[in-house]
Image (cartoon, helix red, strand yellow):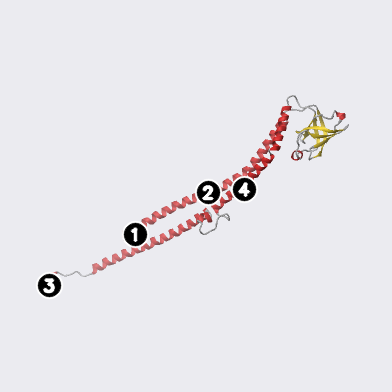
Amino acid sequence: MHILGKILAFLVVIAAIVASIFTSKLVMVRNSWTAKSVTSKNKFSTNLPEIEKLQAKIDSLKSELFRSEELWGIPWNGVETNIKNAAEGTLIVNIGTSNGVRQNLALHGFEIAADGSSIYRGSFSPTEVGDANATLKPNWRATAEDVSKWQGGNWRWRNALPSGYQDNFDRQLLAILKLEETLADRRRTLIGQKELLEQANDGLKMREAELVGGDVLEKSPSVEPEFRDGLVSAIEQSEEERNKTLQKVDELRRKVRNVQAEIERLQTENKELVQRLPEPGPRNAVTQKK
């Protein structure tokens, strides 16, 4: 019984060591998943607006570079220009026949910003020409989105393109037409991307719920705790059960120790009682007495 007690005590120590190792591993896994979830969510939310902002800036700079590579023909500076019909993109300018404007003459308009920079708004042709004013229509398919960006005021107008620049202008028109033709596709793509984003958010919500719990998890009693209440809760329950197990093991160890102590005490008492017994006399003496 003494050896059995030692074996049980040794097993208790081993069980405690193994439980400590598994506990540390569980804590490390829980902390790792929590850190990854928070980092991924913050990184996604932080970088998305900056990427969209930089992409818009790149597109704007490319467009500005294309429009600013060359000067246009003979200018009319400081021409008062106003939008007549935003749906059609028609303009009214305060230059007319007295300034050399006539029918079938292509005019190229530059909107002048407050800082003095210019934005090319396209090629226009006169539909009505007076002595001091004219109505112009775009020679390209203007959209309401394009016209909404125009600002009335003092524009610069030119009547010709530099030599060799017509090809660049045609490529710009083709690019605009291509953009208009693919706008519906881009919008469909955007809708698809929004759906993917919603799915990704749902997936992220599910992953977070699997980690820390949530309403999206099934609450059936037949489901494992980690899939019902989340991994963190399951780990906490496992830790609580482990602590209870360790407590029971400690109680058993104490009981075994007490039983072992009681056995040793009884053995000591038995030895003492045996030593108190009288010594038996010689066998032959007993025979003679009889």
Amino acid at the residue labelled 3: Thr
Residue 33: give its label: 2
C-alpha span from label 1 to label 3: 49 Å
Closer-to-camera residue (175/67) = 175
Q: In this figure, which residue is indicated by the disc labeled 3?
A: 287
Q: In this figure, which residue is indicated by the disc labeled 4?
A: 198
The correct choice, above or below, for 92 with respect to 70 in the image is below
- Foreground mark, 4 or 3? 4
Q: Upstream in the sequence, badge 1 or badge 3?
A: 1
- Looking at this view, name the residue that lies furthest to the left: 288
C-alpha span from label 2 to label 4: 22 Å
For label 3, the SS is helix
Residue 96: give its label: none
Question: For residue 273, which quarter of the picture?
Answer: bottom left
**Label 4 Cα neighbours within 10 Å, binned few <14 / some 14-19 / many ≥20:** few
Q: In this figure, which residue is indicated by the disc labeled 1?
A: 5
What's the residue at 12%, 72% (across, down)?
Answer: 287
- Foreground mark, 4 or 1? 4
Residue 216 percent across, percent down from the top left: 58, 54
Tell me: 239 left or right of 68: left
The correct choice, above or below, for 222 with respect to 126 in the image is below
C-alpha span from label 4 to label 3: 109 Å
What's the residue at 66%, 43% (across, down)?
Answer: 188
**Label 2 Cα neighbours within 10 Å, binned few <14 / some 14-19 / many ≥20:** some
